[in-house]
Image (cartoon, rainbow, N blue to C red):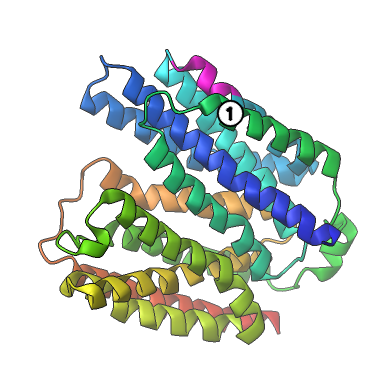
Amino acid sequence: MGQKSATLTLYSIGHALIDFLSVATLFQSISLDASLSRELAGVLILFYDLAAFALQPLFGMLVDLRRWQRSIAIVGCLLVASGFLWMDTPFLAVTFVGVGNAMYHVGGAVAALRITPGKAGPAGAFVAPGTLGLCAGIVCGPIIGFPLGLLALAVLLLAFLIHCNGERGQVSDEEMVTKAVKFSPMLANNLVLLVLVAVGLRSVIGNLAGFTWKSNPLTETLLTYGALVFGAEFLGKLFGGYIADRFGWARTLTLAMILATVLLPLGFLVDDEAGVLAGLFGVSMFNIAMPITLIVVVNLLPGREGFAFGLTAFVLIAAALPWFMGMVPPAKYPAVPLALVTGAATLLLWWCLRRYNKITT
């Protein structure tokens, strides 16, 4: 395995571990505190999401300014690993893992993005394992007595390996500058804004696409449902970037989003095996857009990879806040708004990539 592949693998597996321990600590701290009401538990989950996502642009600016991606990732590991020590004070435990999670995401993302600048594949390879970690944390976290200490030891080992790995496989600042695409800052900023609107629409779609499938034996348990949906999301993110690098970003994203516009609503309208498969395939197609939109924003903000990554994370949580806070009532016929929002995101992303291709070629 070459240096680039080894570095990308290290940070990607680390992403899964960090999300696993962070989310498991969150849910186990809630499970252990019998006095915690349902409302306070919801506030704690919201606080974690805000810490883990909303702080990323700030840490991203720090990384861009000082080039401390490795150090930020290591500190993030240490904070997440120490979170379980404060389980008797849920707010403190969640503070540790939320802030540490944000730090690792930014540090690890910048390291991954500097392996092959301008390519969507490494972006997807870094982001995708976080989906598996999130799923594992949701499933294992509420189990009283789940060995968080062993996970914490694994994260400490991760920090040690990142330290030993150094900057191997990452290009220098000078090479990043020479590889950066030159274009008008005003055009770039306007396009970044539109792409972020599309990212926000993707977050809305993710909150609308809560399939039911209650009567289907394939997904009759929450564990099975979660494994299928998170697995489909993982595959879309993991392979989407590499497919886009091979066949073209605009072509890949447009086709994937058109398929998602058709298949995601079918996941609601059809409740048999065909509906399950349509919904899962739609989830994969929808998540192919993730590494493409991320690398477009990164390329439009040359030299600010950390801020670009953090900005997309911030938009995701900002667009999801109305659902987290219970401000959006459940749709009576979710397939209709899902189709409309997915279609709008498809058109916007198609137009953005056309403009991007014009100003970068």
Quadrant in which the C terminus is drawn: bottom right
Q: Is residue 288 magenta?
A: no
| Quarter of the figure with residue 277 | bottom left
Task: Specify the segment rendered in magenta.
Answer: 82-87
Relative to 15, 53 lies left or right: left
- The residue type indicated by label 1 comes to Leu
Q: Residue at x 81, y 37 (%)?
A: 163
Q: Which residue is mark 1?
A: 150
| Quarter of the figure with residue 281 | bottom left
| Quarter of the figure with residue 26 | top left
Q: Is residue 83 magenta?
A: yes
Per the image, label 1 sits on a secondary structure element best described as: helix
Q: Quick one: 134 or 79, which is closer to the camera?
A: 134
Q: In terms of secondary structure, what is the magenta stretch mainly? A: helix
Relative to 64, 253 lies left or right: left
Q: Residue at x 64, y 28 (%)?
A: 153
Relative to 15, 258 lies left or right: left
> Residue 33, position in %: x, y?
32, 17
> Residue 238, position in %: x, y?
57, 65
Q: For the view shown, which residue lies furthest in the left direction?
A: 332
Q: Residue at x 60, y 46 (%)?
A: 15
**Residue 136 visible at all:** yes
